[in-house]
C-alpha cells in the first residue's frame, strides 16, 4: 500500500481506504473490512447516518493501525448536538478517539461558526484528532475554515470517480494549492462503471490493465490516486473485492497511459447522473439527515 500526506499535517494515510455506506450485514461486512485492513486499506470511513458504526467498531477491534473516519450529520450541527453526536459515535465505535471527524454535508440553517466551535472543542479535548468536511464547495470550505481559531480542515470528502469529475471544476486546484486532501467516495460512480453503458471505455482501461496485470476497476482507482492529494475509499462487496481494491495501489500508471485515459474521457458525452440530487440534498441536508436518523433509530 502507498501512503499519502493528510492535508498539511505530518500524518500519512493509505491511498486506498474502504467506504462503508450500506454495509449492514454483520457477518459478511465485518469479514470484508478486516480483510481490507489486513491488505493495507487501513483508512476506514463511516458516518453516524450510515447506522453501522457499531459494526465498524467490531470490525476494527484488535487492529492498531486503523485510521478511523466518521461524520456528524447535518441536523446535529448545533454546538451541543455536535458534542453529543461525537460522544455517541465514540461509544458505538468502541474507541476513545476518532482520527478524522467530518461534517457530512453543509447545513446553511445552522451558523457554521457554531458548528466549527464545537469541532475545535472536540479536537482540543482529544476526542478527535483531525477535522474534515464532506461535500463542501470552495466558498463553504473557506467559511468553515475561517470559523476555526487554531485548527485546519485537512480534508474534503466528495464524490469523485473516473466518470464523475465535478470536483475538478470547482475544488481540485484549490485543494492542491492549500494542501487539502480529497477523499474520493463512490469511485466507481455508484456502480455506473460496471453498468455496461461505458463498455468501450472500460475496455480501454482493461487493455491498459493487462500491461500491469490489473483489472479495469483497479486502473480506474489508480487513475484517481495518481493525483498527489487524492485518496479513494471504494466500498467492497466481499473479501475478494476488498483485496482487489487494495491492490489498486502500490504501482503507477505511466504518464502516456494517463494521457490516453484523459483523452478518451474528453470524448465521453454522457456522464452518469449520480450527482443530480446534490443541490437538493445541500438545501435540505438537515431535514433529510434527521429523517434518516429516525429510520435508523439512532441514539
Image (cartoon, rainbow, N blue to C red):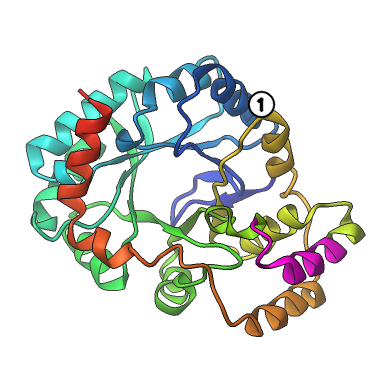
Q: Residue at x 61, y 66 (%)?
A: 162
Say if the magenta span includes residue 127: no
How far from the left and from the top, in percent, is residue 247?
75, 44
Helix, strand or loop for disc 1: helix
Mark 1 residue crowding within 10 angstroms, few (<14) / some (14–19) / many (20+): many
Say if the magenta span includes residue 206: yes
* Magenta-drawn segment: 195-208
Compared with 24, 268 (above or below) is below
Q: Residue at x 15, y 44 (%)?
A: 75
Is residue 95 among the parts visible in the rendering?
no
Compared with 281, 122 (above or below) is above
Please name whichever residue, 115 or 191, is drawn nearer the observer in this view of the structure: 191
Please name whichever residue, 203 or 110, is drawn nearer the observer in this view of the structure: 203
Position of 142 compared to 8: left or right?
A: left
Is residue 273 among the parts visible in the rendering?
yes
Please name whichever residue, 93 or 202, is drawn nearer the observer in this view of the structure: 202
Position of 274 compared to 215: left or right?
A: left
- Count the numbered circles shown: 1
Identify the residue position indicated by label 1 in the image: 35
Q: Main secondary structure of the magenta part?
A: helix
Please name whichever residue, 146 or 44, is drawn nearer the observer in this view of the structure: 44
Quarter of the image with the N terminus in it: top right
Farthest residue toward the front?
196
Compared with 263, 165 (above or below) is above
How far from the left and from the top, in percent, is residue 277?
33, 63
Q: Quadrant of residue 99?
A: top left
How far from the left and from the top, in percent, is residue 287?
15, 48
Q: Residue at x 22, y 34 (%)?
A: 293
Quarter of the image with the C terminus in it: top left
How far from the left and from the top, in percent, is residue 234?
57, 46
Amino acid at each position: 500500500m502507498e501512503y499519502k500526506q493528510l492535508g498539511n499535517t505530518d500524518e500519512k494515510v493509505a491511498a486506498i481506504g474502504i467506504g462503508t455506506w450500506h454495509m449492514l450485514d454483520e457477518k459478511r461486512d465485518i469479514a470484508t473490512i478486516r480483510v481490507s485492513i489486513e491488505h493495507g486499506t487501513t483508512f476506514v470511513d463511516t458516518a453516524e447516518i450510515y447506522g453501522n458504526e457499531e459494526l465498524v467498531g467490531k470490525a476494527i477491534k484488535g487492529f492498531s493501525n486503523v485510521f478511523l473516519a466518521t461524520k456528524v450529520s447535518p441536523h446535529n450541527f448545533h454546538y451541543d448536538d455536535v458534542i453529543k453526536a461525537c460522544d455517541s459515535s465514540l461509544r458505538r465505535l468502541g474507541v476513545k478517539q476518532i482520527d478524522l471527524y467530518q461534517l457530512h454535508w453543509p447545513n446553511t440553517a445552522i451558523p457554521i461558526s457554531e458548528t466549527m466551535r464545537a469541532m475545535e472543542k472536540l479536537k482540543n479535548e482529544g476526542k478527535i484528532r483531525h477535522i474534515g468536511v464532506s461535500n463542501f464547495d470552495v466558498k463553504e470550505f473557506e467559511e468553515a475554515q475561517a470559523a476555526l481559531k487554531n485548527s485546519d480542515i485537512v480534508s474534503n470528502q466528495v464524490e469523485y470517480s473516473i466518470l464523475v469529475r465535478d470536483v475538478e471544476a470547482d475544488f481540485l486546484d484549490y485543494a492542491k494549492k492549500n494542501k487539502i486532501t480529497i477523499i474520493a467516495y463512490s469511485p466507481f460512480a455508484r456502480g455506473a462503471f460496471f453498468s455496461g453503458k461505458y463498455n468501450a471505455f472500460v475496455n480501454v482501461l482493461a487493455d491498459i490493465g493487462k500491461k500491469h496485470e490489473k483489472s479495469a476497476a483497479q486502473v480506474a482507482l489508480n487513475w484517481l490516486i495518481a493525483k498527489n492529494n487524492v485518496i479513494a475509499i471504494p466500498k467492497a462487496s466481499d473479501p475478494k473485492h476488498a483485496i482487489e481494491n487494495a491492490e489498486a495501489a502500490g504501482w503507477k500508471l505511466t504518464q502516456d497511459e494517463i494521457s490516453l485515459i484523459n483523452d478518451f474521457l474528453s470524448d465521453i458525452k454522457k456522464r452518469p447522473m449520480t450527482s443530480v440530487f446534490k443541490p437538493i440534498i445541500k438545501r435540505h441536508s438537515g431535514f433529510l439527515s434527521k429523517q434518516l436518523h429516525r429510520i435508523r433509530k439512532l441514539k
